[in-house]
Every structure is written in structure tokens, then in C-alpha cells.
Image: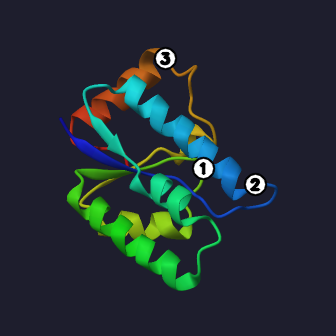
Amino acid sequence: MNLFYMSHPVSPKDDETIEGNLARAKRWRKWLVETFPQHAFIAPWIEEIEIIGSDGTPVERERGLLRDCAWAARSDAVILVGGRVGSGGLREGQAAPRIADLTALGVEPPYALEGDMLALLRRDLEGGLRVA
């Protein structure tokens, strides 16, 4: 079983909110867990933001990113989701041994993804993350 660290943008862009981005991140994690049950997906930053709050100081945010990068480095790969890569995701990806960039799948999880596309994605996750 591989351990994947899920990265999703939190900072709002355009008409987004932090709360909306956290809700989307939770939907992405649920989709990953349901779609690839043979792997473990973590996103410890979700709980940390909920505990510390989204209005943390720059020092608190930096400490959180350092903890996130430590988790990313210990994972088999970072999975980038959510339609774009935020500044935190860039750092998490740099800390990771490998990256799977799924941002092209869109802002919301692709529940309608099936057939060949899903088979290719499953093969890539199982076979060493050829997606990047």
C-alpha cells in the first residue's frame, strides 16, 4: 500500500474562499480514497487549518508548511489536485520523492471519470507514478 500526500490549494483565488477550498479538498480526498482503496491518502493540513484557523499569522503558516513538507517527504508521492497548484503545493511537491499532477482533472473531483481514463490513472498510480 502506497502512502500519498494530497495537496490542494487553500488560499482563495478570484471568487473562492478558504472554507470553499477546504470543502473541495475534502471532496477530493474522499474521491481518492473511494477510487483507489488500495492506497492511503493523507492531507494533515486540513485538520491543522481547522484547529489553528484560517487566519493564522505568516509565522504560523510557515510552521504549518514545514510540517506539511515533512509529511510530503515521508510519503511515496504528492498528489496535486484542485485545478491549480498553490504556493504551498509547490513547496510540498519539492519536498516529495515523486509527484502526480492531477490538476488537469479540474477543480472538483471527477466522479464521472470512468473507462479508459480511469484505467490509465489507476495504472499510473499503481505503477510508479508516471504522471507528472
Q: Mark 1 falls on what kind of element?
A: helix
CA gap between label 1 and label 3 equals: 25 Å
Q: Residue at x 61, y 42 (%)?
A: 24
Q: CA distance from mark 3 to mark 2?
A: 28 Å
Color scheme of the displayed model: rainbow
Residue placed most toward the observer, 120 or 22: 22
Marks 1 and 3 close (CB-CB < 8 Å): no
Tell me the residue at 22%/50% (across/down).
Answer: 76
* Between discs 1 and 3, the one toward the N terminus: 1
Task: Classify mark 2: helix, strand or loop.
Answer: loop
Q: Which residue is mark 2?
A: 16
- Check disc 1: other Cα within 10 Å, few if <14, some if 14-19, many if 20+: many
The residue that mark 1 highlights is 22
Camera-nearest label, 1 or 3: 1
Residue with the most extreme left position: 1
**Front residue (pair 100, 92):** 92
Q: Which mark is residue 60?
A: none
**Hey, what amino acid is under mark 1?**
Leu
Tell whether 83 sits left or right of 28.
right
Which residue has dot 3 on it?
114
Residue 57, quarter of the rendered image: bottom right
Q: Residues within 10 Å of mark 3 (few under 14, many from 20)?
A: few
Q: Secondary structure at mark 3?
A: loop
Question: Residue 69, relative to residue 113: is it above or below?
Answer: below
